[in-house]
């Protein structure tokens, strides 16, 4: 049984039909990249799974229907989401931001603050600083770490490397690998093929609100037609 | 200079400013949450007064029972309003929410008229707190004002510690600015909002319990306070608690000073001229001319009459010169 199963997912913003029957599955510990050009509905897919945009269709997590639940209930069932806007909480310190990632009533977690401080010494140094004062890269690390503090079984990460320096992109890639090592499934929304191809076990390509291709990274790299039609600008 | 008068007026102004803050703190928190002004907020202040009057005077259970019980009762009413009213109206947008709170304010006012009538209720300061605590010069400072200051300050310290030192407080702070992100982390944001609304209305009710004995408890109590509270949160900066505190103090203290002073605008002008070393006789002609004009009556008025204009004038000036308010953040 798949960990997360999305079946005929439709979503609307007002009258515009954004997702038009998305199907995908994610297994325990899998790293899936969701690729595609801007505006094809990749972020909306994440938001619908999270319940932030009302979903039509079926989404099951560990066999239980979650479509129609409130976002906090979906998060509590074990799905984590790092949106692309890097919403750190201003006015709270780095440490306090991390602490808010811990869910109410949460038991033992696979992650501790110390894990992230080791991966990103910058966060350790700046743990008592207002999170709003961090650089873009540090904020990205913080929002990823904050979601992981809640110990999700699958984490959806939207464009984590957007606008980051190559050095910071490498840090993001390191964290993604660490997540995978801990057998946590990842749904990675990315534009940059390099990172996605390197770490993914499977890729989905989206176009016009639907999944238009599914395969392994190697299969996608050898399929020029799909890349040209749906990915390359 | 009468230092006794100035000291006591400042203390009275502090008492007034602090209870303004009790009401405006809740309103500004609720504004951060909803994104619209809650026009019914002052109605909960008035309800606080009426409930306290029933408990303390009609049922004879004393003020000391009413003091903790009324905020709990009105806070619960506030939560019901949020859960079964506002939360549904929210789906239809800000305009619908605004009109809902407008309607609620009128509904509560009419309800109070129906149940209690139009007249002013004899809701009085408890006997122990009647009288004078101390005098400065020959100016008495009432025990009850001191009590108001004490209660308000304790509440703020509690609220401040809750918001900044506890995890719940931090979740509230984060949820006010980033509700979606906080939901995505597994926190029940609708529940948090209901609680914030409840606490906001409870604070307004507490202000009603402690302030209305010094004022008049009547169906118009809400309509009298409401505009001042709006002025305060606009001047302080919408959504800013610190701004609400500063603006509450400015308006509380200055309006108290205007009310207490026996001066007229004319005499103030004379005093200012003297202070600046301007020969008054030079101004006699222009002021005489002024008095002949339409605004002539204005300078003969007492500062108490003219002072009523002050909060609104301040708001208009703030909106022109610093639209985000004293401590507010400019909307991006």
Image (cartoon, coloured by chain):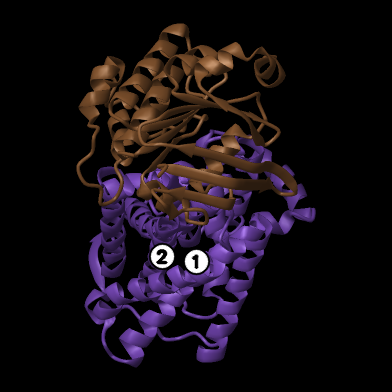
Q: Residue tagged by mark 1?
A: B82
Q: Which residue is nearer to you in this view: A14 or B242?
A: A14
Q: Residue at x 40, y 46 (%)?
A: A75
User: Badge 1 sits on which subunit?
Assistant: B
Q: Residue at x 65, y 23 (%)?
A: A37
Looking at the image, residue B192 sits to the left or right of residue B221; the answer is: left
As helix, strand or loop, the secondary structure at mark 2 comes to helix
As helix, strand or loop, the secondary structure at mark 1 comes to helix
Q: Which residue is nearer to you in this view: A30 or B54?
A: A30
Q: Position of residue B203 (x, y in %)?
A: 38, 63
| Label annotation for residue B319 | none
| Label annotation for residue B198 | 2
**A2 relative to B145, above or below:** above
Q: Position of residue A121 (x, y in %)?
A: 27, 15
Chain B pictured colour = purple
Image chain in brown: A
């Amino acid at each position: 049984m798949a960990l997360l199963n999305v079946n005929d997912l439709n979503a609307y913003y007002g009258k515009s039909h954004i997702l038009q029957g998305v199907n995908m599955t994610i297994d325990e510990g899998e790293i899936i990249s969701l690729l595609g050009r801007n505006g094809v509905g990749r972020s909306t897919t994440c938001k619908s799974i999270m319940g932030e945009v009302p979903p039509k269709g079926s989404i099951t997590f560990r066999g239980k229907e979650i479509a129609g639940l409130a976002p906090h209930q979906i998060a509590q069932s074990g799905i984590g989401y790092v949106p692309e806007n890097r919403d750190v909480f201003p006015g709270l310190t780095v440490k306090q931001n991390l602490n808010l990632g811990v869910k109410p009533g949460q038991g033992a977690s696979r992650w501790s603050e110390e894990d992230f401080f080791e991966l990103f010494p910058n966060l350790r140094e700046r743990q008592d600083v207002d999170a709003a004062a961090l650089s873009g890269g540090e904020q990205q690390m913080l929002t990823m770490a904050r979601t992981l503090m809640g110990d999700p079984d699958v984490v959806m990460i939207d464009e984590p490397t957007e606008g980051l320096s190559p050095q910071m992109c490498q840090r993001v890639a390191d964290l993604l690998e660490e997540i995978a090592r801990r057998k946590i499934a990842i749904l990675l929304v990315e534009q940059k093929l390099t990172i996605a191809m390197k770490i993914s076990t499977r890729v989905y390509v989206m176009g016009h609100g639907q999944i238009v291709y599914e395969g392994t990274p190697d299969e996608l790299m050898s399929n020029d037609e799909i890349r040209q039609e749906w990915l390359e600008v | 200079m009468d230092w006794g008068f100035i000291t006591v007026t400042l203390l009275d102004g502090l008492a007034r400013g602090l209870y303004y803050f009790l009401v405006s703190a809740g309103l500004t928190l609720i504004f951060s949450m909803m994104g619209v002004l809650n026009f019914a907020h002052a109605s909960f202040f008035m309800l606080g007064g009426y409930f306290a009057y029933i408990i303390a005077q009609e049922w004879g259970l004393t003020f000391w029972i009413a003091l903790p019980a009324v905020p709990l009762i009105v806070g619960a009413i506030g939560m019901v309003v949020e859960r079964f009213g506002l939360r549904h109206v929210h789906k239809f947008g800000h305009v619908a929410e605004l009109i809902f709170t407008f309607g609620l304010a009128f509904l509560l006012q009419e309800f109070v008229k129906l149940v209690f009538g139009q007249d002013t209720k004899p809701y009085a300061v408890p006997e122990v707190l009647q009288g004078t605590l101390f005098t400065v010069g020959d100016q008495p400072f009432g025990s009850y004002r001191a009590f108001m200051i004490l209660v308000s300050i304790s509440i703020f310290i509690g609220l401040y510690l809750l918001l900044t030192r506890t995890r719940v407080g931090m979740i509230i702070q984060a949820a006010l600015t980033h509700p979606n992100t906080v939901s995505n982390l597994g926190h029940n944001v609708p529940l948090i909002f209901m609680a914030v609304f409840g606490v906001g209305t409870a604070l307004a009710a507490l202000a009603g319990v402690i302030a209305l004995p010094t004022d008049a408890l009547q169906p118009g109590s809400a309509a009298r306070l409401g505009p001042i509270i709006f002025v305060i949160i606009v001047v302080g900066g919408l959504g800013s608690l610190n701004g609400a505190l500063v603006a509450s103090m400015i308006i509380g203290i200055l309006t108290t000073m205007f009310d207490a002073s026996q001066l007229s605008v004319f005499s103030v002008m004379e005093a200012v001229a003297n202070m600046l070393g301007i020969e008054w006789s030079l101004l006699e002609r222009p002021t005489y001319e002024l008095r002949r004009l339409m605004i002539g009556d204005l300078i003969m008025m007492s500062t108490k009459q003219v002072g009523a204009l002050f909060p609104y004038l301040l708001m208009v000036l703030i909106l022109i010169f610093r639209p985000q308010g004293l401590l507010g953040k400019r909307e991006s």
